[in-house]
């Protein structure tokens, strides 16, 4: 038999992708989560599998090629429900593949730099999901050249080779500010998130762009720099109280910041939304039970975790990093903390 006619005795996911004329990530999704691709794509991949002789359990063997069966999730604050919801999504998808998820709280005092370095070894895990935006993956790669596959969840990466699962923060800010504009507010302030991180910058950019699109001058808007914390909200409230021309509405870059803002105003005798309307961002579990219930932007956090885990599984199954990345859409949740401008 001529060499060109010999069957491939060890076909790969790349062979299937070429035969189906799709990406390797699409092949991985069609095989592991067929509901995520169209019927036409499933049929093309199935035909390519039959043509190449690819064995479906190759993926399972690849997932365990390091014999650890473990995924590491690096989380900056495990007690924050924002991150715990993302972790739920990661664990759900990994459990379906019999993979364990080891969670490391990167901000614990006991978590030294050397301790964190242990997680970046292929001998200790099959892959890593990073939820902490303080990490420079480019720096990590320079000191750990043989890294396991990495994806980020809820954060952007400074390494274009790392797939990301994130929420469309620009769109979220647009939804928040547009709602306040529809309520008749034209003097709208913003308490930012961390501006050293892409999500915080995107929410600020979305805030400014939406004001500009409404014919308002964003350079004249009251902006207080924060860091997503309760304290940032309280400090912003103190600054707002000292203003002569106070914004009638404030968009906070996180629900926690909005809670700090509202609580500090309450201690000063001010009422929300009677004296100022407030919108948050995240829709964490307590948002609907706060007083007043918080109007906010919902982040599909669990879906972010699920997508991040699937991106990582795609990499472990032979997918290419540049074929990854998912951006999910947020939506507005209207409650009682924002009202029509007096």
Image (cartoon, rainbow, N blue to C red):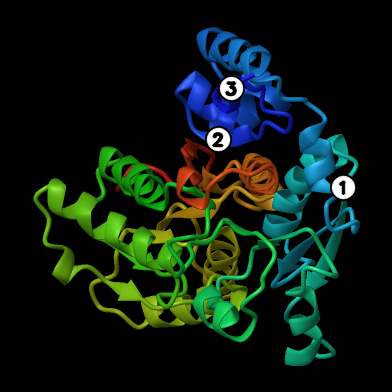
* Viewer-side residue, 55 vs 72: 55
Q: Nearer the viewer, mark 2 or mark 1?
A: 2
Question: Which residue has dot 2 on it?
Answer: 24
Identify the residue at image location x=35%, y=83%. 242
Numbered label attached to residue 99: 1
| Mark 3 and mark 2: Cα distance apart in space | 28 Å
Please state the horizontal and vertical placement of residue 28, each as a whole percent of the image. Answer: 64, 32
Q: Secondary structure at mark 3?
A: loop
As drawn, 53 above or below 98: above
Q: Is residue 186 visible?
A: no
* Viewer-side residue, 264 vs 2: 2
Instruction: Mark 1: give few (<14), some (14-19) or many (20+) Cα within 10 Å.
Output: some
As drawn, 104 above or below 47: below
Q: Is residue 105 visible?
A: yes
| Mark 1 and mark 3: Cα distance apart in space | 42 Å
Identify the residue at image location x=52%, y=69%. 261
Instruction: Mark 2: give few (<14), some (14-19) or many (20+) Cα within 10 Å.
Output: many
Q: Nearer the viewer, mark 3 or mark 2?
A: 3
Question: Which residue has dot 3 on it?
Answer: 2
Quadrant of the snapshot with the N terminus: top right
Give whichever of discs 2 and 1 has the lower sequence position: 2
Give whichever of discs 1 and 3 has the lower sequence position: 3
Please state the horizontal and vertical placement of residue 60, each as a whole percent of the image. Answer: 83, 38
| Mark 2 and mark 1: Cα distance apart in space | 21 Å
Please state the horizontal and vertical placement of residue 93, each as a whole percent of the image. Answer: 77, 39
Q: Are marks 3 and 2 in contact (CB under 8 Å)?
A: no
In the image, taking residue 182 as reference, residue 161 lies left or right, namely: right
* Viewer-side residue, 131 vs 245: 131
In the image, taking residue 268 as reference, residue 57 lies left or right, namely: right
* Viewer-side residue, 88 vs 146: 146
Numbered label attached to residue 271: none
């Amino acid at each position: 038999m001529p060499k060109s006619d010999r069957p491939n005795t060890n076909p790969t996911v790349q062979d299937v992708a070429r035969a189906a004329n799709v990406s390797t990530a699409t092949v991985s999704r069609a095989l592991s989560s067929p509901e995520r691709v169209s019927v036409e794509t499933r049929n093309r991949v199935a035909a390519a599998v039959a043509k190449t002789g690819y064995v479906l359990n190759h993926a399972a063997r690849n997932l365990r090629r390091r014999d650890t069966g473990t995924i590491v999730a690096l989380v900056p604050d495990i007690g924050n429900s924002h991150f715990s919801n993302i972790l739920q999504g990661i664990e759900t998808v990994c459990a379906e593949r019999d993979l364990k998820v080891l969670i490391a709280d990167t901000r614990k005092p006991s978590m030294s730099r050397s301790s964190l370095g242990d997680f970046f070894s292929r001998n200790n895990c099959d892959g890593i999901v990073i939820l902490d935006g303080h990490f420079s993956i480019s720096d990590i790669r320079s000191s750990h050249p043989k890294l396991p596959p990495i994806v980020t969840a809820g954060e952007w990466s400074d390494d274009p080779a790392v797939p990301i699962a994130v929420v469309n923060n620009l769109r979220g800010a647009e939804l928040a500010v547009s709602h306040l504009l529809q309520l008749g507010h034209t003097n709208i302030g913003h308490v930012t998130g961390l501006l050293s991180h892409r999500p915080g910058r995107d929410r600020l950019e979305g805030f400014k762009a939406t004001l500009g699109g409404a014919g308002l001058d964003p350079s004249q808007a009251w902006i207080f720099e924060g860091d997503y914390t309760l304290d940032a909200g309280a400090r912003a409230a103190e600054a707002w109280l000292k203003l002569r021309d106070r914004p009638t509405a404030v968009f906070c870059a996180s629900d926690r910041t909005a809670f700090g803002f509202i609580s500090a105003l309450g201690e000063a005798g001010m009422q929300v939304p009677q004296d100022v309307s407030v919108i948050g961002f995240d829709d964490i579990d307590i948002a609907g039970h706060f007083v007043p219930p918080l109007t906010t932007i919902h982040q599909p956090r669990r879906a972010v975790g699920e997508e991040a885990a699937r991106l990582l599984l795609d990499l472990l199954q032979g997918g290419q990093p540049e074929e990854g990345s998912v951006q999910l859409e947020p939506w507005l949740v209207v409650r009682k903390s924002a009202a029509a401008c007096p």
